[in-house]
Amino acid sequence: MTCFSDADWAGSLDKRKSTSAYIPFLGPTPISWSSKKQRVIAWSSIEAKYRALAIAKYSVEMKFSFLHSPTLFCDNLGVTQLSFNPIQHLIMKHIQIDFHFVRDLVEKKLLHVRHVQTNDQLLDLLSKPLSRQRTKYLRDKIGLTNGSPFLRGRIKETKEITAITAVPPPV
């Protein structure tokens, strides 16, 4: 089990809230994903990304056991170091609950936090506006498809019954 975690710091122009995003993978397969605004305004990018890391941790906390502890990937070195270096916690007093939550799991070896290069951060797809080319690249890397027109349909009413039929989209 691995999980990518990311946040854009103060990306919401109206209220300056950050957006957290995560995608947990079971092997190479994404099993869910989420992207939503954080409830509080983050004072720094480290805080925004650390909160996203704590939220992502819940996604890998499932009701079955693994041979190896889950690994969370984050593209912020400060957050990665903060998860296993207790000395740095003084700079983050305002997020102590998230800090202690993740730190405790790392100490108990129930969770690993690893750095991922920014170019390999899959979660930019859910947390930032991107070019069409970058969106396609990340979508393909995650394993998502654009959908197929033959899967689209519409309800077709007849005198006998109402049925759902596969109808090609209008040209």
Image (tube, helix red, strand yellow):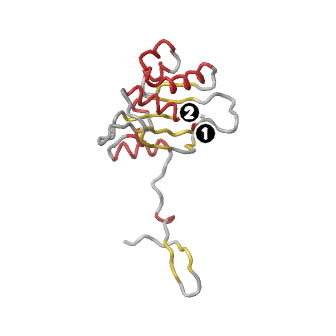
Query: Mark 1 — residue?
Result: 26
In this rendered view, identify the residue nearer to me: 131 or 37.
37
Residue 23 image point, x, y percent: 51, 40
What amino acid type is highlighted by mark number 2? Lys
Q: Residue at x 63, y 25 (%)?
A: 110
Seen in the picture, residue 51 relative to 150 is either above or below; the reply is above
Residue 125 lies left or right of residue 28; in this view the side is: left
- On the image, the x and y values in percent for residue 135 come to 38, 45
- Give the residue displayed 57% in from the left and 25% down from the top: 112
Label 1 and label 2: CA atoms lie apart by 14 Å
**Residue 144 coordinates in the image, percent (x, y):** 49, 48
* Residue nearest the observer in this picture, 55 or 96: 96
- Quadrant of the rendered image containing residue 77: top left
**Vertical placement of residue 108 versus 60, above or below:** above
Which label is found at residue 65? none
Q: Nearer the viewer, residue 87 or 164?
A: 87
Note whether 58 is above or below 159 in the view shown: above
* Callout 1: SS: strand
Comparing labels 1 and 2, the label whose residue is closer to the camera: 2
Is tag 1's residue or tag 2's residue first in the polypeptide sequence? 1
Amino acid type, residue under disc 1 in the picture:
Leu
Q: Residue at x 54, y 74 (%)?
A: 165
Quadrant where the C terminus sits is bottom left
- Checking the image for residue 57, the label placed there is 2
Question: Is the N terminus in the top left, top right, bottom left or bottom right quadrant?
Answer: top right
